[in-house]
Amino acid sequence: MTRLTTFADAEATAVRAAEEIARQVQRARAARGVAHLALSGGSTPARTYELLATALPDWDGVEVWFADERCVPPEDEESNYRLADETLLRPAAIDPARVHRMEGELGPEAGARRYAEALGEHVSPAEESSSSLPVLDLIALGIGPDGHVASLFPGAPTLDAGEQAICLGVHASPKPPPERITLSLAVLRAARHCLLLATGAGKAYAIAAALAEPSRQVPASLLRRERLSVIVDDAASPTPAPR
């Protein structure tokens, strides 16, 4: 069952999201000695990352990954890595050797292939499963007004990549820039936990659709409900989608 938590405003939402991420990281380290955390970009998680930088007593044993990336250099203003670096990685003094960025400058296919190899090398599959998919401990996700997560967009071919796909190149994103790299839906669904974060009235319909019947037109609705926490402010609280 999906856990939905609503807070009065964006700041309270960010505080709760940072606490939840820290809690999941500590749980993973206690269980396995390492925590594999994947981050997303966008404006919504920036404040969460700022708070997260001081939410843990230390970052030992935390491996940082990314849910998606724009095909731009890491110093570009549109880079998800740059956002995370400015708000979390440097303020928390996380060892760069434990930060695994998607190399967007390589282009969609080469970047996706390189990232899939890195995930396969460092992240183990689930012991109880016959699947070879790497299992991340927590993926922090935003959601677009259209219901997309990572760079998996409504009705896109990437949603049909199959259960063994790890990382995918995107060539025709409906949002600029058109070329991106994204974790596959299979990897999102294989994660031990996903956190979906949204603030603002512009996300209310998307959250409602994400919690409704699963649909390829709302990629967020395809996440594993029993492994999903949704944290929103009052403005983004689910409301019925227009007919």
Image: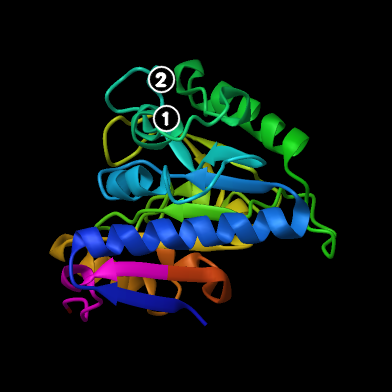
Horizontal arrangement in the rendering, residue 147 relative to residue 140 (left or right): left
Q: Is 149 in front, or is 61?
A: 61
Residue flagged by tag 1: what amino acid is it?
A: Tyr
Image point (16%, 61%), residue name: 202
Q: Is residue 207 visible?
A: yes
Numbered-mark total = 2
Residue 199 visible here: no
- Type of amino acid under label 2: Pro
Please name whichever residue, 97 or 217, is drawn nearer the observer in this view of the structure.
97
- Could you tell me residue 94's position as x and y percent? 53, 31
Q: Which region is colored magenta?
A: 230-242
User: Which of pointers 2 and 1 lies earlier in the amino acid sequence?
Assistant: 2
Characterize the local packing of mark 1: few (<14), some (14-19) or many (20 or more) Cα atoms within 10 angstroms: many
- Residue 37: image location, x then y, percent: 56, 47
In which image quadrant can residue 201 be found? Answer: bottom left
Q: Residue at x 52, y 53 (%)?
A: 139
Is disc 2 surrounded by few (<14), some (14 to 19) or many (20+) residues within 10 Å?
many
Q: Secondary structure at mark 2?
A: loop
221 and 10: which one is in front?
10
Judge whether 178 appears above or below 162 on screen.
above
Q: Are marks 2 and 1 in contact (CB under 8 Å)?
A: yes
Could you tell me residue 88's position as x and y percent? 40, 37
Query: Vertically, is 4 above or below 147?
Result: below
Q: Is residue 225 magenta?
A: no
Which numbered disc covers residue 81? 1
Residue name at image x 51 percent, y 22 percent: 103
Q: Which residue is mark 2?
A: 74
